């Protein structure tokens, strides 16, 4: 497993380098001047040229890219063009909020989807199964940018049960977590149902029932346990969707996380902050997929890494 782990770590280097290169190229090709945004339209050409030189934006793109890679090699992501704050410290300030939101969304999805998927599998072909499948289909179809405002209007504006924006209490976390976790819950419920239905048809489940195991034990101890690998795969793959969905959700609910910081940085053409935020998302996504591969070995002892 050690060799597999080291090999996968080495393979992440070209992936992250490709992400970094693509983001650097796109953010510089998008129309807009960060210096003009900082100084305003009425700034004199001399002031614009002076600030551009002070920020190093007057250098060729290849020189700016080389400086970025050099700083990245020593763990220095640069400083924000707008606030002059270190990119690392700016992201570190926002990361706890995003981690809190992502964890809450994942917990909501798992606690809702897995019981729903198991019940639908056990009741396959019945009205319970059809109802669960319909709910999951609706969850997949509803986009977060529509669900978030709808939840805010109903539960915050009309009913006044929950705060509509900000962070500070568990009540502030409810609406963003549901908005972010609902699509994941829908996908996970469908995958859980499909996996458990397939395992329930296997002979070892029938053998367990023949040996006197209760139906609940046969389902949970045997069928569900052996269906965990595809479920874990979906969780690992969907974690990237949670991170990208956090960009929209944090903006809707004014949640002070990395996603909202990314949107603000893009609007101000703050190149170092944009690069740092997207690099963090890419690293997290790669790390979660690596962790997912390692979890396979614990779930199924037959899996061996070479």
Image (cartoon, rainbow, N blue to C red):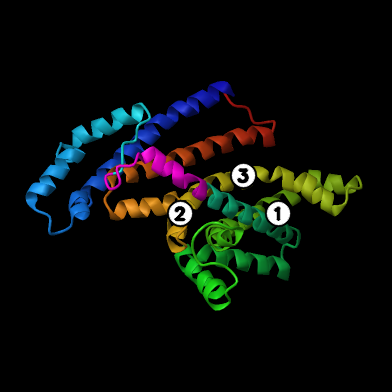
Residue to which mark 3 is pinned: 232
Dot 2 falls on a residue whose secondary structure is loop
Q: CA distance from mark 1 to mark 2?
A: 41 Å
Dot 1 falls on a residue whose secondary structure is helix
- Compare marks 1 and 2 and give the one earlier in the sequence: 1
State the image quarter where residue 194 is shown: bottom right
Residue placed at 48% from the left, 47% from the top?
A: 240
Residue to which mark 1 is pinned: 197
Magenta region includes residue 82? yes
Q: Position of residue 222 (x, y in %)?
A: 78, 44
Residue placed at 45% from the left, 60% from the top?
A: 254
Magenta residues? 81-98
From what the image shows, is residue 114 above or below residue 281? below
Q: Quadrant of the C terminus?
A: top right
- Compare marks 1 and 3 and give the one earlier in the sequence: 1
Q: Is residue 31 visible?
A: no
Number of other residues with Cα within 10 Å of mark 3, as a class: few under 14, some 14 to 19, many 20 or more:
some
Residue to which mark 2 is pinned: 256
Dot 3 falls on a residue whose secondary structure is helix
Q: Quadrant of the N terminus?
A: top right
Residues at marks 3 and 2 touching, judged by CB atoms closer than 8 Å: no
């Amino acid at each position: 497993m050690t060799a597999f782990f080291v090999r996968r770590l080495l393979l992440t280097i070209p992936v992250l380098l490709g992400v970094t290169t693509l983001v650097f190229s796109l953010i510089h090709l998008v129309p807009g001047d960060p210096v003009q945004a900082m100084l305003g339209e009425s700034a004199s050409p001399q002031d614009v040229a002076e600030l551009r030189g002070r920020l190093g934006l007057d250098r060729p793109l290849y020189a700016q890219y080389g400086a970025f890679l050099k700083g990245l090699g020593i763990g220095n992501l640069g400083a924000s063009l707008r606030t002059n704050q270190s990119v690392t410290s700016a992201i570190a300030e926002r990361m706890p909020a995003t981690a809190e939101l992502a964890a809450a969304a994942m917990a909501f999805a798992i606690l809702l989807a897995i019981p729903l998927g198991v019940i639908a599998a056990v009741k396959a072909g019945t009205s319970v199964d059809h109802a669960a499948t319909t709910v999951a289909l609706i969850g997949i179809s509803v986009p977060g940018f529509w669900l978030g405002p709808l939840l805010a209007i109903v539960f915050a504006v009309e009913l006044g049960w929950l705060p509509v924006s900000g962070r500070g209490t568990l009540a502030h976390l409810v609406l963003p977590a549901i908005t972010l976790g609902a699509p994941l819950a829908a996908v996970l419920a469908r995958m859980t149902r499909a996996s458990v239905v397939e395992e329930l048809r296997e002979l070892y489940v029938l053998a367990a029932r023949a040996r006197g195991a209760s139906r609940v034990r046969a389902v949970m101890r045997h069928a569900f346990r052996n269906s965990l690998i595809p479920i874990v795969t979906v969780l690992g793959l969907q974690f990237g969707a949670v991170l990208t969905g956090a960009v929209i959700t944090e903006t809707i609910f004014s949640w002070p996380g990395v996603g909202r910081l990314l949107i603000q940085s893009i609007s101000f053409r703050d190149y170092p902050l944009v690069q740092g935020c997207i690099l963090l998302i890419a690293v997290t996504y790669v790390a979660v997929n690596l962790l997912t591969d390692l979890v396979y070995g614990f779930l199924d002892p037959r899996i061996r890494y070479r």
